[in-house]
Image (cartoon, rainbow, N blue to C red):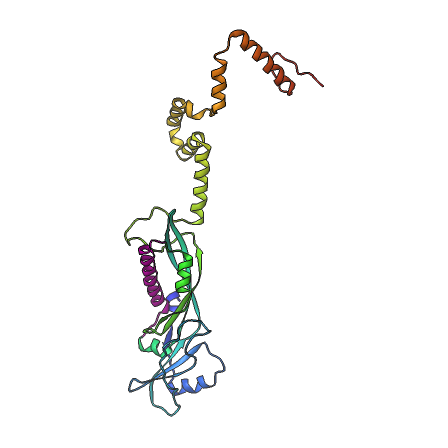
Amino acid sequence: MSEDIAKQLYSRTDRRPWREIFGYKWLTKSDSSLVVRDFDGRYFMLGRRGDPVDSGGPAAMIDDAPEPSLRGDYADSFRVDVTEHVDSRAVGIPTVYGTESVDVWVSWWVHDPVQVVRTRTMYGWHQIRTHLSGILRQLADAQTEAGSGLGAPEIMRHLGVTQRMAEAGLSYRVFDIRLRDSGEELLLGQQENEWVRFSWTNDRRGEYDFCLQALRAGPVSLAALWLLRHPDQVQQVLDWSVGHQDLLGPAHTDWQEELASLLGTLTDQERKEISSILRDRIAALGRQVPGVTATRK
């Protein structure tokens, strides 16, 4: 059974309506409501209507269909799923670093079973998903016009309270937003056919940190990275290395350049004296100097 079929909101019962009514009255607890229709098109209902828990949102507009009678003459009866469902919508939120891919988690349910049957709303998540996408696009446009971005806090502030779809008898609310890895997503703040450079996921953040470290390490690490990705271009990398020794060699600080310039102005005798003092000092530190034996204390 496919996922869509598994989430059918209602189904026509096989037994005669009066048998369904009699059997439903004996149930102590049920995850469905019973909707009955007579030959004149009027609806009757047994079971729960409204929200499964206190959602804190606006009051739902519910069809006040009366309860059916065992003596009534009815044409059809339907079982409507009134349990709470959970689904997610993949969304791409634009940021200064690219598109941040998230999953918007949604809790949804039937608050008006009669309206679900009347409008033949067979698949609830499809209706919820379409409605949610429209509201997210409106939020993104409004935030753009206001000069601010749309992020998880703004989405939760607007959609964390119950949203009513009175025309379909459905309600939903967003209860969580989490980073996702990949997949098809609703792109906010962009044209539908606009190409996205990349998705700002956890993997992308790791790649960004790696590239940042390679740039900080300098041309040597970048040349090595290029050779790793293009092993067939060894000759080109070697040629570039030979021609750019100034970039690949150790960097000279200002004081090193100043010292080298100063030494160049000394006479031969002054250089010999400086060399002797420097060799003795290095040897005293325990370093190996050619032609000098370090003294032990």
Q: Position of residue 190 (x, y in %)?
A: 30, 53
Q: Is residue 9 magenta?
A: no
Q: Is residue 137 magenta?
A: yes
Q: Position of residue 7 (x, y in %)?
A: 39, 69
Q: Is residue 85 visible?
A: yes
Segment tinted magenta in the rendering: 120-148
Is 229 or 169 nearer to us in this picture?
169
Q: Quadrant of residue 19?
A: bottom left
| Residue drawn 44% across the image and 31% down it | 218
Q: Does 281 appear above or below 227?
A: above
Is 182 or 56 nearer to us in this picture?
56
Q: Quadrant of residue 37?
A: bottom left
Q: Position of residue 36 (x, y in %)?
A: 36, 83
Residue lying farthest to the top in this orientation: 269
Q: Position of residue 21 (x, y in %)?
A: 41, 86
Q: Does 281 appear above or below 202?
A: above
Is 17 or 116 nearer to us in this picture?
116
| Residue drawn 42% across the image and 23% down it | 246
Q: Does 50 appear above or below 88?
A: below
Is 295 or 166 nearer to us in this picture?
295
| Image quarter hosting the C terminus | top right
Tally the numbered discs.
Answer: 0
Q: Quadrant of residue 174?
A: bottom left
